[in-house]
Amino acid sequence: MHKRLFFSSLAIILVTLLLSMLSVNLVFQKQFSDYLTRSTEETLEQLPERLSSSFLSHGCWDPDSLYSISHSLPLGTHIVLKEPNGTIIMSLINPMESMMQNDSGIGMGMGMGIDMGLSYSIEEWKNKSFTISSPNGILAIADVRYPAKAKVLNPADQSFVSAIYQSLLFAGALALIIGILLSYWTSRRLISPLQNLTKAAQRVGEGHLDEHVSVMTKDEVGQLAIAFNGMADSLKKQEHLRKQFTADIAHELRTPLTSIRSYIEAFQDGVLPADKENLTIINEEIERLVGLSSDLKDLNVAEMGALKLNFTQVDITELIDKTVNKLIPLIQEKGIAFEWEKPASVFIEGDEYHLTRLFYNLIHNAYKFTESNGRISIQMELRQSDVRISVCDSGIGIPKEDLPFIFERFYRAEKSRSRETGGTGIGLALVQQITQLHRGTLDVESNPGQGSKFTVVLPCAP
Ligand code: ADP
């Protein structure tokens, strides 16, 4: 991965570099050629003036003076100077061009040759004709032929161009070296946190759930590290809950079983009579075991999304009232004040059996966690499209740090107290699953020492 990333970024750098050098080269060549063409044309514009001054100052066509004019001619330019009657006076060509042609063995003649053959190829020519005149009349006609697109022929221009190419190449090589170093560094920087994550994931897989990776950046890799740490934390918490649950469930099973065994031994030894009262106690313990196993089964089924709900029109007011009636003897026995003013019927689409469990669990919790002389109230508010039911108590409340977890299965705030109350931490997880299956919401507000308020919002029947 590291190598692949490095080589792919290197390939991108190379292609970009090549393309940019190529386009710089093209643009430069075009601009430079345009510049040369312009300067050739400007030089040629001045030619009639210079030729006529040369003639007038010498009184004839002086070869030395013409030779010096031919020196300033742009390379590739050829001039045929003619009498007005057409007789050729002489041809002018830059002497340097003649030398170049001689060097390549093609040229002929000296600075002022009549040769038109060149050692370079010119695709297109332009022709111009200038009239050289004096105040006394026409002196001569100059027929000029020059390349339509000037090429770099002058040694000074050539060295300028090669200096440009050299610096272009140097800049390219420098950019390449910097690019290689940068792509090596970037690929290392990208890969090393991923390698750390892989190692950490392997350690977590081996059961080291304390494993965390350091979050160095805020980018996608940083977010991945945060997500990984969150996952490791959650796995650790789940593992802790699982161990806690195994211990709790063992306790929950042992307590009623021990009690049942003691009663049976007492019956066998004749210490206690197997009368209705004692058999009722055994029956309650068995009921508790059955309730526990059915809670566990339902929660498991609900969490797997396989809980089969039998939706009908349910009068939620009636349902809560029936649930309250089941629990009211317990509540009164404990000396808790109870407030429930049965409102008018409200119908919702729901599963009667599971909704009963939902409210039973909430009211039973309120009963379990409220001391005698406390107060429990149930409020119901019918809103536009839903019904809001709150179960409030003035009980022990829930510590702030426990609040985010109480809907997780097997979670119990203040374990020792819950054990006294016989809880296993399944009730609220089940309440939440049932609420969600009814497309409702469940909220809790609680202050330790002051009480709790559980609010369920359920959509009304259309
Ligand atoms: P349990 O079987 O332990 O009651 P629940 O899932 O019903 O399990 O509740 C989880 C935990 O939330 C309880 O152990 C208790 O600490 C806390 N809790 C639930 N309801 C109340 C309440 N009304 N007042 C105080 N604490 C509560």
Image (cartoon, rainbow, N blue to C red):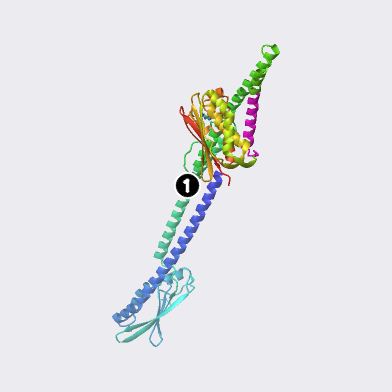
Q: Badge 1: how crowded within 10 Å, few (<14), some, or many (20+)?
A: some
Can residue 88 be seen? yes
Q: Quadrant of residue 246?
A: top right
Indicate whether residue 298 is drawn in magenta: yes
Front one among 307 and 228: 307
Q: Is mark 1 within 8 Å of ligand 1?
A: no
Q: Is residue 263 left or right of residue 51?
A: right
Front one among 85 and 281: 281
x then y, percent, for residue 124: 48, 74
Q: Which residue lies most toward the bottom here?
A: 85
Front one among 294 and 462: 462
Q: Is residue 5 above or below residue 60?
A: above
x then y, percent, for residue 99: 43, 70
x then y, percent, for residue 234: 54, 34
What residue would you read off at disc 1? 182
Q: Is residue 181 left or right of residue 461?
A: left
Instruction: Name the residue type under label 1.
Output: Leu
Indicate whether residue 189 is drawn in magenta: no
Q: Is residue 36 above or below residue 374?
A: below
Name which residue lies at 48% across and 38% down.
215
Where does the magenta region start and end? 286-308
Main SS of residues in magenta: helix
Q: Is residue 139 left or right of residue 221?
A: left
Front one among 361 and 29: 361
x then y, percent, for residue 12: 52, 53
Q: Quadrant of residue 357?
A: top right
Quadrant position of ligand 1? top right
Label 1's element?
Answer: helix
Q: Which residue lies most toward the right here?
A: 268
Q: Is residue 86 above or below residue 170?
A: below
Q: Quadrant of the N terminus?
A: top right
